[in-house]
Image (spheres, rainbow, N blue to C red):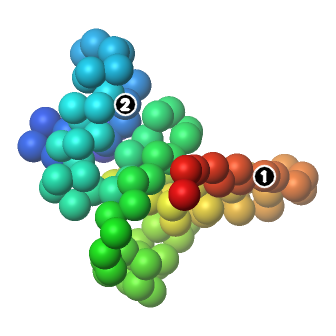
Amino acid sequence: MASFSSTEYGKTDFVLLDQLTEEAFMQNLKLRFKMGKIYSYIGEVVVSVNPYKQMAVYETQYVDDYRGREMYEREPHIFALADAAYRSMKRTGRDCCIVISGIP
């Protein structure tokens, strides 16, 4: 696991929480959101919290930063999931599916 999983920004992957309770989950999510970290992992699942503001996390530099990297080499991001799915599809020659779900 990469060193960016620190308590300063909360745990980047919720499976690393010391206690897996609703309170611990929400506390970690709130801390990450407060620090501007809108993406987190739960294993291979990417959790996103709508920041309700423009953020520079979708610029070309981010695409380049995540391209060809393993999912956990960088901070959680939708680009990490997309690249992992693409590489898996290329490697196996099989289709893949990404489910996006949320509350409006």
Which quarter of the rendered picture does the N terminus lie within? top left
On screen, 30 above or below 64? above
Compared across the picture, whether 83 is left or right of 4 comes to right
Q: Amino acid at mark 2?
A: Phe
**Residue at the image position 71 percent from the left and 53 percent from the top:** 98
Check disc 1: other Cα within 10 Å, few if <14, some if 14-19, many if 20+: few
Query: Circle 2 is placed at which residue position?
Result: 14
On screen, 29 above or below 93? above
Secondary structure state at the residue bearing disc 1: loop
Say the numbered circle drawn on residue 48: none
Compared across the picture, whether 86 is left or right of 5 comes to right
On screen, 1 above or below 4? above
Disc 1 and disc 2 in contact, CB within 8 angstroms: no
x, y (%) of residue 93? 89, 56
Which quarter of the rendered picture does the C terminus lie within? bottom right
Disc on the earlier residue, 1 or 2: 2
Compared across the picture, whether 92 is left or right of 103 comes to right
**Residue at the image position 36 percent from the left and 74 percent from the top:** 57
Q: Amino acid at mark 1?
A: Cys
Query: Circle 1 is placed at which residue position?
Result: 97
**Residue at the image position 33 percent from the left and 64 percent from the top:** 51
**Residue at the image position 71 percent from the left and 62 percent from the top:** 86
Seen as rendered, the residue at the extreme right is 94
Seen as rendered, the residue at the extreme bottom is 60
Secondary structure state at the residue bearing disc 2: helix
